[in-house]
Image (cartoon, grey):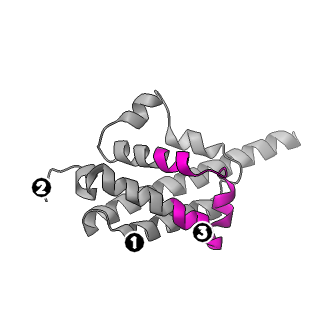
Amino acid sequence: MDEFASPFERLGSRAAIARLAERFYQIMDSDPAYAELRAMHGPDLVPMVASLTDFLVAWTGGPRDWFEQRPGACIMSMHVVLPGLARTTATQWIDAMSRAMAETQPGDAQVRKLVLEALGRMCDGMAARAAHLASQRETLAQA
């Protein structure tokens, strides 16, 4: 593999990322261990599979369609406002993604590890920010 290849290229490009996103949502939808996470989503996961695929493609260095379709969008801000976002659901998300990554094995082991670590930090940040915002709302409600 070219040492200068993007994570997008190293993961196997769009097709491999699409398989990863599809498997992620299959796991989340079918395993009761992810019930809280699943409850945060609507009944039809097809749009979510497409959105996650497009986000991961763009985020890993592929075509930036996801960002171009959402000018100025911040993935963190889009998620911290979701009811139910907490440490538990963030942990469920990264666990389901880890399973999907292990099952679909896109790219090489090193890039999978790096991507999972970065996504894990993103989940941690979202959970911490959601907790902080909830605490602020609680403080304001008591005032």
Q: Is label 3 in contact with label 1 (beta carbons under 8 Å)?
A: no
- Which of the two labelled residues, at mark 2 and mark 1, occupies the earlier sequence position? 2
Q: Is label 3 in contact with label 2 (beta carbons under 8 Å)?
A: no
Q: Which residue is mark 2?
A: 2
Q: Which residue is mark 3?
A: 30
Q: Position of residue 103 (x, y in %)?
A: 39, 72
Q: Which residue is mark 1?
A: 103
> Per the image, is 32 magenta?
yes
Mark 2 vs mark 1, foreground winner is 1
Which residue does the image show at 57% across and 39% down from the upper left?
77
Which residue does the image show at 46% across and 71% down from the upper left?
99
Whole-Å distance between the Cαs marked 2 and 1?
A: 24 Å
Range covered by the magenta-colored residues: 25-50
Three-letter residue code for mark 3: Ser
Chief secondary structure of the magenta portion:
helix
Considering the numbered disc 2 on the image, is that residue within a helix, a strand or a loop?
loop
- Nearer to me, 136 or 55: 55
Considering the numbered disc 3 on the image, is that residue within a helix, a strand or a loop?
helix
Whole-Å distance between the Cαs marked 3 and 1?
A: 15 Å
